Image (tube, rainbow, N blue to C red):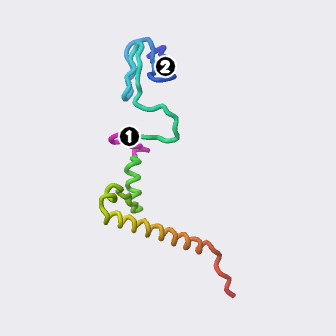
Amino acid sequence: MSNASVSATSYPYTITGAGTGGINYPNVTIGAGTGSIYPTWSNSISPKIRLDGEGADIEINGESMIGMLKRIEERLNILTPNEKLEEEWEELRALGNRYRELEKHIIEKQATWDRLKAMPPPDID
């Protein structure tokens, strides 16, 4: 598109240009002449990136972030409680509570052990 201009101060973005043909992007078609587009993404400024929908993922050098996180959770044996099931099933809720209590106890015990290991060895003469 030659001599094209874009007015992007607010929605819809207005694209004007001369010539024939057009430019196609995913979810957006820009044709020759004048037209308006409504993008499928948000322009709000935020420090977060949010992807919704079936198959939403981020790939880095062909590696899926979703797949990588799942493998990390499996390797570290990270359990994700199912709160809906815990609401319905007393046994599962009791087991989940016991797990959380034991986890807290072990974390406290590990912190104590770490402090002991960080201490200088005793001076025995």
Q: Name the N-terminal-most of marks 1 and 2.
A: 2
Question: On screen, 3 above or below 99?
Answer: above
Q: Give x and y (percent) for residue 83.
A: 36, 56
Q: Which residues are magenta?
A: 51-62
Question: On screen, 66 above or below 9?
Answer: below
Depth check, front residue: 108 or 75: 108
Question: On screen, 62 above or below 108?
Answer: above
User: What residue is shown at x 42% (from left), y 65% (from top)?
Assistant: 100
Q: Is residue 34 magenta?
A: no
Q: Give x and y (percent) for residue 26.
A: 37, 29
Q: What residue is pinned by disc 1?
A: 52
Q: Is residue 58 magenta?
A: yes
User: What residue is shown at x 46% (from left), y 23% (from top)?
Assistant: 11
- Which structural element holds mark 1? loop
Question: On screen, 87 above or below 36?
Answer: below
User: What residue is shown at x 45% (from left), y 67% (from top)?
Assistant: 103
Amino acid under disc 1: Asp
User: What residue is shown at x 39% (from left), y 48% (from top)?
Assistant: 66
Overall secondary structure of the magenta stretch? loop
Badge 2 crowding class, 10 Å Cα cut-off, few under 14, some 14 to 19, many 20 or more, is: few
Seen from this angle, which residue lies furthest bottom? 125
Q: Give x and y (percent) for residue 54.
A: 32, 41
Badge 1 crowding class, 10 Å Cα cut-off, few under 14, some 14 to 19, many 20 or more, is: few
